[in-house]
Image: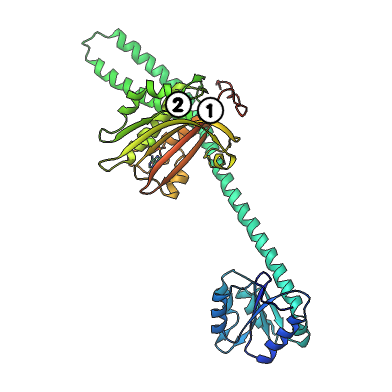
């Protein structure tokens, strides 16, 4: 049955032969299913109608006064199925129609006109199936890409963790021996200066390998009950030292924070990594960085935005936020910012954020990133509160 109800499938029939379009119209009138119908007599008319009334399906004559019906496939661009009707069926026409992307190809006969509703129903069914398959395929590719990414990060983590661990042990031996040598040398020994330089370089290397260990989640956890605000206040001078002089540094600290179970040194390392990045992102004269803490209830939806694989359960969490008025990040940088060795800086090493990732992961927390070019960056870290119902004990110290 034909109606004006736009909740039923809208068919556009493109047909220059009046008799044929009337036959189809009459047939659809008598059909059990409800349809909305528009008729166009040329390619041009069809394009105008499609523009004004996006259809659910198009039945088009193969040859039209101003072109081929198959040209409508590119006009609809995947919006709906196009079924080609032709007076003479031959193989070449069929091949051309399918090549052009038509969903089906039907030779006009009186039986086809009489049963046009069945052709429409079949067209809509097949279209829905194709769309389902397309969606499933896209979802599959998305998951595959995601899995590859996770595997890549995991293997990088394992590798860098392994190297960093051995490297760190070797460096401790180097540092120990250099320290011993220094203690045995007289104050004015000419070699002292060289040994001091070697010591400083080895210390820098040890710091780097600790960062890599942190990224791999194999860093040593020295957990204790921690009040984030107290930690930040205690280390305010150290934090301020990594920020350029011309940047305004604001602290907005909540004094009534519940305790979290955390490794204070590692949390300080995280804060420093965030502050350094914020400072480096500000290139204008009057930039500012805010370091804030708080406690708040979070719902599942917002927690699912965490950049860590393991999402937290809804509940109350202590948070720490570093917000800057810097250059911000585009979507590509945001996507890669936690990848080890990813950097957009000439001098960067790209280990800061990957260490933050590893450290917050081992604290069973969450990381939220809000950033866009020109709008600055806000990074918020969440930590489970001790004794809350959703609190889970952080895994025991991972010893090698
Ligand atoms: N606050 C920020 N503002 C703008 N970009 C940032 C910020 N934090 C991180 N990034 C981006 O993430 C990248 C990775 O950061 P990081 O791992 O610390 O490496 P690095 O600082 O050595 O480049 C940076 O190079 C930068 O592009
Ligand atoms: Mg950095």
Residue where numbered disc 2 is placed: 267
Decide if residue 395 is on the left or right side of residue 190: right
Residue 363's tag is 1
Provide residue 118's location: percent of width, then percent of height.
76, 76
Residue 269's tag is none
- Which quarter of the image is occupied by the C terminus? top right
Provide residue 362's location: percent of width, then percent of height.
53, 28
Q: What residue is at 24 percent from the left and 18 percent from the top? A: 193
Q: Secondary structure at mark 1?
A: loop
Q: Quadrant of residue 131?
A: bottom right
| The image quadrant in which ligand 2 is located | top left
Q: Is residue 135 above or below residue 74?
A: above
In the foreground, 118 or 301 = 301
Q: What residue is at 58 percent from the left and 78 percent from the top? A: 72
User: Looking at the image, can residue 351 be seen?
Assistant: no
Q: Secondary structure at mark 2?
A: helix
**First in sequence: mark 2 vs mark 1:** 2
Q: Is residue 29 above or below residue 308?
A: below
In the foreground, 342 or 17 = 17
Decide if residue 32 is on the left or right side of residue 77: right
Label 1 CB less than 8 angstroms from ligand 1 = no
User: Looking at the image, can residue 376 be seen?
Assistant: yes
Q: Quadrant of residue 12?
A: bottom right
- Which quarter of the image is occupied by the N terminus? bottom right
- What crowding class fits label 1: few (fewer than 14 Cα within 10 Å), some (14-19), or many (20 or more)? many
Query: What is the CA distance from the residue labelled 2 to the residue labelled 1?
Result: 9 Å
Provide residue 68's location: percent of width, then percent of height.
58, 84
In the foreground, 9 or 145 = 9
Whether the residues at callouts 2 and 1 have beta carbons within 8 Å, the answer is yes
């Amino acid at each position: 049955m034909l109606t004006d109800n736009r909740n039923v499938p809208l068919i556009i029939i493109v047909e220059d032969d009046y008799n044929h379009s009337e036959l189809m119209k009459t047939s659809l009138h008598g059909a059990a299913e409800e349809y909305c119908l528009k008729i166009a007599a040329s390619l041009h008319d069809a394009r105008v109608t499609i523009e004004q009334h996006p259809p659910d399906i198009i039945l088009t004559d193969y040859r039209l006064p101003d072109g081929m019906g198959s040209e409508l496939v590119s006009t609809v661009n995947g919006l709906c199925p196009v079924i080609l009707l032709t007076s003479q069926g031959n193989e070449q026409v069929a091949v051309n129609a399918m090549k052009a992307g038509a969903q089906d190809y039907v030779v006009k006969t009186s039986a086809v006109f009489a049963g046009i509703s069945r052709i429409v129903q079949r067209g809509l069914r097949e279209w829905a199936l194709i769309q389902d398959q397309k969606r499933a395929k896209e979802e599959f590719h998305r998951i595959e890409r995601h899995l590859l990414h996770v595997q890549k990060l995991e293997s990088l983590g394992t590798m860098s963790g392994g190297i960093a661990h051995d490297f760190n042990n070797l460096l401790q031996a180097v540092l120990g021996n250099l320290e011993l040598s220094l203690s045995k040398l007289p104050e004015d020994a000419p070699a002292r200066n060289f040994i001091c330089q070697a010591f400083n370089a080895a210390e820098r290397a040890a710091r780097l390998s600790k960062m890599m260990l942190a990224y791999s989640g194999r860093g040593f956890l020295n957990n204790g009950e921690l009040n984030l605000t107290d930690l930040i206040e205690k280390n305010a001078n150290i934090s301020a030292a990594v920020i350029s002089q011309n940047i305004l540094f604001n602290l907005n600290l909540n004094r009534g924070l519940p305790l979290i179970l955390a490794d204070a040194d590692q949390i300080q390392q995280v804060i420093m990594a965030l502050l350094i990045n914020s400072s480096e992102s500000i290139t204008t004269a009057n930039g500012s960085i805010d370091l804030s803490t708080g406690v708040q209830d979070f719902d599942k939806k917002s927690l699912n935005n965490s950049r860590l694989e393991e999402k937290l359960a809804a509940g109350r969490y202590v948070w720490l936020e570093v917000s800057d008025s810097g250059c911000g990040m585009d979507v590509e940088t945001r996507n890669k910012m936690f990848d080890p060795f990813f950097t957009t800086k000439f001098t960067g090493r790209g280990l800061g954020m990957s260490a933050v990732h590893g450290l917050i992961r081992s604290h069973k927390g969450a990381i939220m990133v809000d950033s866009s070019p020109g709008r600055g960056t806000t990074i918020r870290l969440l930590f489970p509160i001790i004794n809350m119902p959703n609190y889970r004990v952080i895994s025991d110290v991972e010893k090698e």
